[in-house]
Image: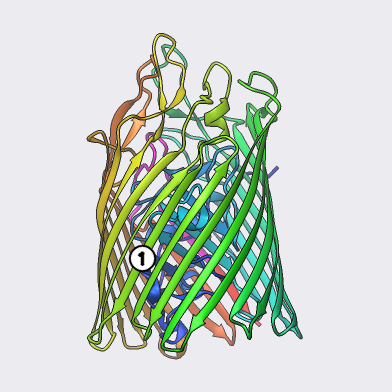
Amino acid sequence: MTKLTQSVAVGALLLPIAATAQPSPDDGGATPLIVTGTRAPDPVPADQVGGSLTVIDPQALVQRQAREISDILRDVPGLAVSGIAGQTQVRIRGTEANHTLVLIDGIEVSDPFFGEFDFGSLAIDQAARIEVLRGQQSALYGSDAIGGVIHYITLSGSEAPGVQVRAEGGSFGTFNTAARYAGVAGDFDYALSATYLGTDGTVGTRGGTRDLDKTSAALSVNTRWTPAPNVRLRFVGRWSETESEFNNQDFLAGSPTFGFAVDSPGTYVENEAIYALVGGEVDLLDGRWTQAITGQLADIDRVGFSNDIENSGNEGSRLKASYVSSLRLGSERVRHTITFAGDWERERFRNTTPGGFAFTGRRQVRNFGLVAEYGLVVDERLAIGAAIRWDDNSLFDDTTSYRVHGSYAFDFGLRARAAAGSGVKNPGFFELFGFVDGRFIGNAALQPERSEGWEIGLEQELAQGVVTIGATYFESTLDDEIFTDFPPPDFLATPANRTTESRQHGVETFVRAQLGPQWRIDASYTRLSSRENSVREVRRPRNTANMAIAWTAPEERGGLTLVIRHSGSQTDNAFLDPSFVPTTVTLDAFTLVSLAGSLRIAEGVELTGRIENLFDENYEQVFSFANPGIGAFAGVRARF
């Protein structure tokens, strides 16, 4: 059995940090169209979105040689990535890891049991783009979207036709490959892709000796059929499987390593997921009125092993159906968009652990949501949007969430924007009903977490667009935060709602320069304060910064990119007390430097290479869990 891949493949890469939705030089300077920032079927220009938005385009993914999405997300302002073998988390603007809605080609992909997505399980396809919308988005998407939305989108056959292949090997016994076949045949648009990543791994604990293997594989299909000019039908399917060795923490009484991660031979996790989406759209009233209906499925199985014996497992599934009606009115100068949407969703979970669970059998929750959204665009300068959503849940009280945003572009290159909204996150199954009996006791009386926040930002173009600078200030307040308590006398882990507020605020800044066709410089800096009752929250660096300096050879014969990523010091919980009361520890700041390059050796064929963690930095993202040192990788990619 092959185990996992800690694909360290991202490090250095060209093209930027995409701090906000700035156009890429590879798209001819055109403003990208965004599908995530609205429930209307038609995408909207990025510069008409009042909230903070990052777009990582396909060329950026190729130039940075990104292999796992968790790597490239480190370049996005306001995001903090915490990765260990078996689970990689992303926190947006100081919110919790399960406060981010994750979509793949429009499908919700979070695990119904854990309530979040393992970003270490998503390998990047040959042709894709990523949209990251920060700030509360529950008015559009319902539960989970407190911190924002991360949407991974594979390109259609018309967007990236032809055959693409890639193969690469290098340090830590790493091998990865990807293939894609896409095109258009009459009214049928198709794209098929496959990815594989495997590694023998590196040591995963302080002072340990056990290398952690990992393998990850995925197959996807994205098709669209247009049987009539005003009718579109779509099917998306995706299968993924990840096997990852990991280490446990030592909780044996009297052990000298109590509370630390230790080598755990025979301990690994297997995760298999199947996702599917079917949908159709029809345009009426000369294309001004669009009706859309979709149905989607997510089915996720996770099995854990200790000493090579199955000791935990769960099965989760999600069914969702949505109907959207969107009407476009007005003139070319003044446009109105009125959208109504209805969502029905059912999540189920079943324990498959052999004995010892706090609950057995199957649990489920149903939710019905209604959305009303309005958009106004005047002279392509002023853009205003508002949305309100009402949710009826089978386990919790009804909730109402809202979002408003606006953007205005001045003649002298300045764009001012602002947004405000509310968010909600329903408790997960393991929080409600329990985990392992005697270790984690569920709390069926938990209430949803609720958040409100706002932001204001400015973006200025200089030297006729050669340089763009921008800054955003944001604030959020979280109520009824779910945390794990350890009440005496037994100190058994139990989730509960906090009675105090959690507050986040900060500043995101960026600079981007395109100095002729050869040089591009991107940099961003985020300053974050995230506190609960005046106590700093864990795994949220106060300072993060990134810089990418990319050089492209004349006639695009190759290129080099230097990437520097800095993560400031952060706190974490450590269970060093035998009573299992957590102790707060500090993780040191670290800076990772990577270098990537490519060389064209024939038409459509390139050699690639990169060095990650160039200066062999020793760092921890989670207390006592180690990370890879310096690594070198080389490969070939071709397009036909």
Please tell me in which quadrant of the rendered image residue 243 appears.
Answer: top right
Name the chief secondary structure element in magenta. Answer: loop
Q: Position of residue 573 (x, y in %)?
A: 35, 31
Counting every numbered tag in the picture gives 1
In this picture, residue 164 sits left or right of residue 531: right
Q: Position of residue 218 (x, y in %)?
A: 66, 57
Extent of the magenta region:
615-634
Going by the numbered disc 1, the residue's amino acid type is His
Q: Residue at x 59, y 42 (%)?
A: 244
Asked whether 24 or 473 is in front, the reply is 473
Q: Residue at x 45, y 33 (%)?
A: 208
Asked whether 253 or 169 is in front, the reply is 253
Whether residue 117 is visible, yes or no, is: no
In this picture, residue 589 sits left or right of residue 393: left
In this picture, residue 616 sits left or right of residue 125: left
Q: Which of the colour schemes (rainbow, by chain, secondary structure, one colour) is used?
A: rainbow
Name the residue that disc number 1 marks: 405
Residue 559, above or below 174: below
Asked whether 628 or 547 is in front, the reply is 547
